[in-house]
Image (tube, grey):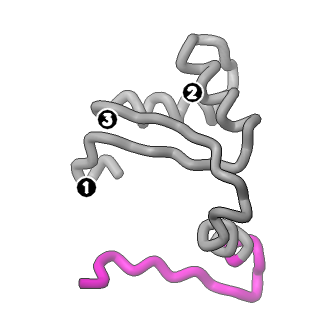
């Protein structure tokens, strides 16, 4: 995201816990190394927001996560499809 020059980031997740943790860190409350690192990255963009999206409304992302966790499937990332 940073290498591509994005100025605005929208984070969508079905985890209310993740939303709360990330928003809490924005107020200086989290002690999690992962959440702190997320905020270090987000501080490099002009604007970011986070929103809840139900899992059943985001089946593509949910399927990708399941593929990554399935050891029999290999995930290939294509840089540019155009």
At which x and y percent is residue 31? 69, 19
Which image quadrant for residue 82?
Answer: bottom left
At which x and y percent is residue 36? 57, 27
Label 1 sits on a secondary structure element that is: loop
Residue closest to the eye, 13 or 29: 13
At which x and y percent is residue 32? 68, 27
- Residue tagged by mark 2? 36
Q: Which residues are magenta?
A: 67-82
**At 46% across and 35% down in the image, what residue appears?**
49
Q: Are marks 3 and 2 in contact (CB under 8 Å)?
A: no
N-terminal-most mark, 3 or 2: 2
Q: CA distance from mark 1 to mark 2?
A: 22 Å
**Badge 2 density bin: few <14, some 14–19, many ≥20, Cα 10 Å:** some
Foreground: disc 1 or disc 2: 1
At which x and y percent is residue 50? 53, 37
Q: Is residue 44 magenta?
A: no
Q: CA distance from mark 3 to mark 1?
A: 11 Å
**Badge 3 density bin: few <14, some 14–19, many ≥20, Cα 10 Å:** some
Q: Are marks 1 and 2 in contact (CB under 8 Å)?
A: no
Q: Are marks 3 and 1 in contact (CB under 8 Å)?
A: no
**At 44% across and 45% down in the image, what residue appears?**
10
**At 63% across and 84% down in the image, what residue appears?**
74
Q: CA distance from mark 3 to mark 2?
A: 15 Å
Which image quadrant for residue 80?
Answer: bottom left
- Residue tagged by mark 3? 45
N-terminal-most mark, 3 or 1: 1
């Amino acid at each position: 995201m940073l290498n591509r020059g994005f100025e605005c980031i929208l984070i969508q997740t079905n985890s209310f816990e993740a939303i709360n943790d990330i928003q809490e860190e924005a107020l200086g409350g989290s002690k999690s190394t992962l959440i702190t690192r997320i905020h270090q990255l987000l501080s490099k963009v002009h604007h970011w927001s986070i929103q809840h999206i139900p899992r059943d409304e985001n089946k593509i992302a949910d399927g990708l996560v399941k593929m990554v966790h399935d050891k029999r499937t290999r995930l290939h990332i294509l840089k540019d499809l155009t």
